[in-house]
Image (cartoon, rainbow, N blue to C red):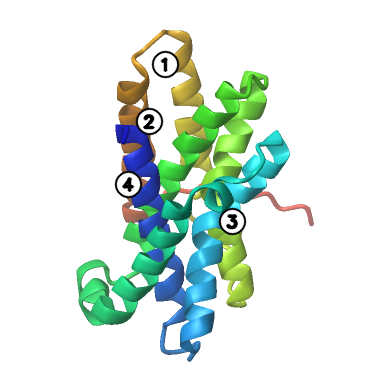
């Protein structure tokens, strides 16, 4: 098992926790199936859109059962340790950020492997990282993070671009992977802590 593959499975597990936690929140009162489904769609949503766009069939979770096992593990882990997880993180931010960072870099890496143009690879990396969360929030009737004031897509785009630049500089692949994930993770946490945001447009003026 390569390091990147292990991180991919771990990212699926963590993103599942993010979705399952959101669905098991008190204000939603969802049953175990809806908790599982929300965790599942959060974990595989962005990667599935990426793979369909790339024409990478069968998509990863269909061809490799380990992704589904990671989803099941993430859901049951959340159900068993939910109270402790909430005490540690207080919000979904930590798990969402970890999963997002991993999936962004996996997305841009796979896109480069399919020899798409590098700008498209950057965009597909972002899609891979954020669309699971977008689908999750939409299913739960929440405003997706991408449409809120806080920075969400920006760290993904910059982290994706960083991976491409380091790739062009022939940085060793696993090192590039780790550096890009850490960049996205740190950028997102700092943006949340210090309330960084892009300038808002007012089209009424």
Q: Real-space Cα distance between discs 2 and 3? A: 21 Å
Residue that mark 4 sits on: 190
Contact between labelled residues 3 and 4, with CB atoms less than 8 Å apart: no
Q: At x 50% / y 87%, what residue is drawn?
A: 28
Is residue 28 left or right of 10 when viewed as pictured?
Answer: right
Q: Which label was assigned to residue 166?
A: 1
Residue 190: percent from left, percent from top: 32, 46
Residue that mark 2 sits on: 180
Q: Earlier in the sequence, mark 1 or mark 2?
A: 1
Crowding near the residue tagged with mark 3, few <14, some 14–19, many ≥20 C-alpha atoms within 10 Å: many
From the viewer's perspective, is the residue at label 4 or at label 3 nearer? Answer: 3
Q: What secondary structure is marked by label 2?
A: helix
Q: Earlier in the sequence, mark 4 or mark 3?
A: 3
Crowding near the residue tagged with mark 1, few <14, some 14–19, many ≥20 C-alpha atoms within 10 Å: some
Q: What secondary structure is marked by label 3?
A: helix
Q: Is residue 86 above or below residue 98?
A: below
Is residue 162 left or right of 84 when viewed as pictured?
Answer: right
Contact between labelled residues 3 and 2, with CB atoms less than 8 Å apart: no
Is residue 55 left or right of 79 when viewed as pictured?
Answer: right
Q: Real-space Cα distance between discs 2 and 4? A: 15 Å
Q: Is residue 38 above or below residue 47?
A: below
Q: Real-space Cα distance between discs 1 and 2? A: 9 Å
In terms of depth relative to the viewer, which is nearer, 191 or 5?
A: 5
Contact between labelled residues 2 and 1, with CB atoms less than 8 Å apart: yes
Residue that mark 3 sits on: 45
Q: Real-space Cα distance between discs 4 and 3? A: 26 Å
Q: At x 55% / y 47%, what residue is drawn?
A: 63
The image quarter containing residue 88 is: bottom left
Residue 14: percent from left, percent from top: 36, 58
Q: Earlier in the sequence, mark 2 or mark 4?
A: 2
Q: What secondary structure is marked by label 4?
A: helix
Crowding near the residue tagged with mark 4, few <14, some 14–19, many ≥20 C-alpha atoms within 10 Å: few
């Amino acid at each position: 098992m390569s390091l990147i593959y292990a991180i991919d499975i771990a990212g699926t597990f963590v993103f599942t926790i993010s979705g399952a936690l959101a669905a098991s929140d008190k204000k939603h009162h969802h049953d175990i199936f809806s908790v599982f489904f929300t965790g599942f769609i959060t974990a595989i949503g962005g990667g599935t859109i990426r793979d369909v766009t790339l024409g990478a069939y069968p998509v990863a979770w269909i061809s490799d059962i380990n992704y589904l096992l990671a989803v099941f593990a993430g859901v049951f882990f959340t159900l068993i340790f939910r109270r402790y997880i909430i005490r540690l993180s207080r919000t979904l931010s930590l798990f969402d950020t970890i999963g997002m960072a991993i999936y962004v870099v996996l997305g841009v890496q796979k896109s480069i492997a399919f020899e798409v143009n590098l700008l498209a690879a950057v965009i597909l990396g972002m899609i891979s990282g954020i669309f699971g969360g977008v689908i999750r929030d939409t299913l739960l009737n929440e405003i997706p993070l991408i449409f809120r004031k806080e920075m969400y897509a920006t760290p993904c785009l910059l982290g994706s671009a960083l991976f491409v630049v380091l790739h062009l500089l022939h940085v060793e692949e696993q090192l590039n992977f780790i550096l890009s994930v850490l960049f996205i993770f740190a950028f997102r946490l700092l943006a949340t802590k210090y309330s960084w945001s892009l300038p808002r447009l007012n089209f009424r003026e």
